[in-house]
Image: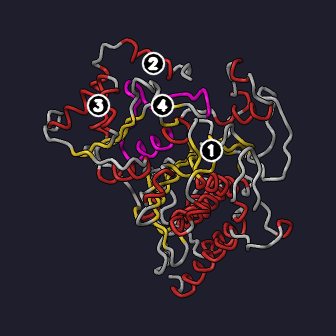
Amino acid sequence: MPNSKACKVMAAGTAVAGSLAFTVTPGVPRSLAPRGATTTGAKTSKADGFAAPALAAALGASACAAARRQTRGAKTSKPRTAQRVVDEFEDVCEQTGVTLSRYCIELANRGIIDEDLSSIFNSIREAAKVISKLVNTAPLKQAELLGLQGEINVQGEDQKKLDVITNDVFKNALRYTGKMGTLASEEEDEPVDGARAGESSEVIPVLSEEFADTGKYICVFDPLDGSSNVDAGIPVGTIFGVFQEPDPAECELPDDLSKGLSEDQQRCLAGTLQPGKSLVAAGYVLYSASTELVLTFGQGVVGFTLDSSIGEFVMTRPSIKIPARGKIYSCNQGNINEWDQPMRDYIEAIRKGEGESKKPYSLRYIGSMVGDIHRTLLYGGIFAYPADKKNQDGKLRLLYEGAPMSFIMEQAGGKAITGHSRVLDIPPVGVHQRVPVILGSAEDVDECKKFFDSSDDPALKARCEKRLQGLAA
């Protein structure tokens, strides 16, 4: 077993590196700041104090590389689940346990993920630590971090200062890996090229024979979901999903999607518009009493908790499985009179104890998607942000909210639907496309779907069919 003291020192070194990689000392000229410390694009902010985590990623990999050992039972006919991979770990450091860095290295060694994806998650890890620090210190730096930025994003929502800052942190962290082809965020009007800030990329039309060589992966993310709750100290989170950039021959877009977009934007758009079932990884980070990172590579769901004493995410939930049925429902019940009739009937049934379980369900609703879904994932039940009369296609964004969360939920044994159809089957037709989302325990979601399937509302079924055909805006 590795020397405990040495292992702790390596982990502490990684924590220091993470801080150094993102911090530019106040007063240092921009010309002396680490590359990536400044931001580019349509949105600007006061985030110049954060640089990309090249040093942290490198030292984090070095620290964990010392713990590599040959795996037990390399050949097995059993499914490669997250739990099985963890069970096979050797020489786990007593002081740190299994860190996220170690976990990614093990998966790369076993051929479950490649080194590019491992590098991307190193950057996500470092960005999450910085955002956690920002959220925790926001009440102490209200003038700098809280309140409105003074701009409106593409959804027509007021941008908070932390929205812009955390978007820059996450974007810069991913760009610096050099492994990203395209980035799409809630806070960006259009997808942006994954090339590092300051680097030029050749502009190639969408339907040309090859794309610019900017990386093989696409990351979609909401840097700070529920940011309006930060002022009140309510849990918030980051949501992200990773796609593999498609074969250019498969990138076929309707003609009308190209109107008003530059060729560079069209190329980015082609790369990001994939249904959720094409995700290769997804996860979220919950910033609450503790900072938890939950992720899946399509091999089950694993949870890590940030240990601030060593600056590392340590595995605390090696295999997350949602209960088959719960007794909690989570939704904004104040809008119930505006929902489609099947959804109203279902909620009324489980609330009164007239559902299949014959037991009344309790309402629990934070109003922060990451917090509500995290509770649902651990305790079971159902989370819903359904369509209503005003928002017939729902309010959650498909690409970087609905799809990643649905992928995680299915990997944990749950289900996710829009009403009649599966969320992961819907092909996006716009980066910020909205979609109704109902997800949670498999039996609860199945029960809800029965209410929709028995509905004779032709308009409701038509909307679901249009989404599946890629016709919904």
Q: Quadrant of residue 311?
A: bottom right
Q: Which of 196 and 341 is in front in this view?
A: 341
Write the start and end of the magenta stretch as one range: 403-431
Q: Is mark 2 on a helix, strand or loop?
A: helix
298 over 25 or under it: above or below:
above
Badge 2: few (under 14), some or many (20 or more) residues near its Cα, within 10 Å?
Answer: some
Q: Where is residue 266 in the image (x, y as percent from the top left)?
A: 74, 30
Residue type, label 2? Arg
15 over 362 or under it: above or below:
below
Q: Residue drawn 62% across and 40% down?
A: 153
| 438 displayed left or right of 62 | left
| 315 displayed left or right of 21 | left
Residue labelled with disc 3: 448
Q: What element carries label 4?
A: strand
Residue labelled with disc 2: 463
Q: Position of residue 406 (x, y in %)?
A: 45, 40
Q: Residue 187 carries which label?
A: 1
- The answer to whether residue 329 is seen in the rendering is yes
Q: How far apart, in angstroms, are the residues tagged by discs 3 and 2?
A: 18 Å
